[in-house]
Amino acid sequence: MGMHTTIHGKNSTPANGVDGTWQPIKVNAAGQLEIATLNGELSQFNRLAGGAVASYTQISTSTTTVVSTGPCILYGINVTTAGTGSTVTLYDNTAASGTKLIDGAITTARGILNDLPNSIGVLLTAGLTVVTTGATPAVVNVFYAPSV
């Protein structure tokens, strides 16, 4: 079993007139140096959890919606109203083409659909585009966070 050590090194970059700040540095089991997360910091976002960690976009029409124009983390979708003949397709792209993530008919309001690996979110590298269709469109909420 490897040993883990956390040390603190001083950042020499002045900030707000102060000559540097103390940054925790971690040595992992492989002997590599890493910047350790701060108390209360979420490692998947590399930031403190002082505000919202995810956003959502609600779609209630038959349309193509660009949810994110750059890399983001997709957490899932929530179907609050099924509609009639509704479908939803999610793409890792800034257009309705490319890699399909979710593609299917919406037959019932199902709550959060999180068929994503490990239910922790999936990093999308290009962006996020959602296409919804239907005679009476479903009401879909898409949960995501900008990648940092």
Image (cartoon, rainbow, N blue to C red):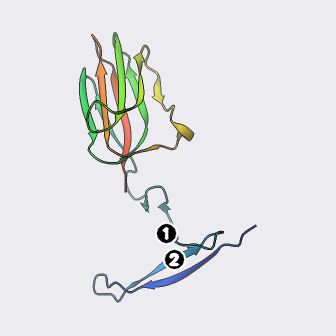
Q: Quadrant of the N terminus?
A: bottom right
Disc 1 marks which amino acid?
Leu
Eyeballing the image, is 27 above or below 60? below
**What residue is at 43 percent from the left and 56 percent from the top?**
45
Eyeballing the image, is 83 above or below 59? above
Q: Residues within 10 Å of mark 1 (few under 14, many from 20)?
A: few
C-alpha span from label 2 to label 1 = 7 Å
Mark 2 vs mark 1, foreground winner is 2
Which is nearer the eye, 88 or 101?
101
Marks 2 and 1 close (CB-CB < 8 Å)? yes
What secondary structure is marked by label 2?
A: strand
The image shows residue 74 at horizontal and vertical percentages of: 41, 41
What secondary structure is marked by label 1?
A: loop
Q: Residues within 10 Å of mark 2 (few under 14, many from 20)?
A: some
**What residue is at 46 percent from the left and 30 percent from the top?**
112
The label number, if any, that marks residue 38 in the structure image: 1
The label number, if any, that marks residue 24 in the structure image: 2
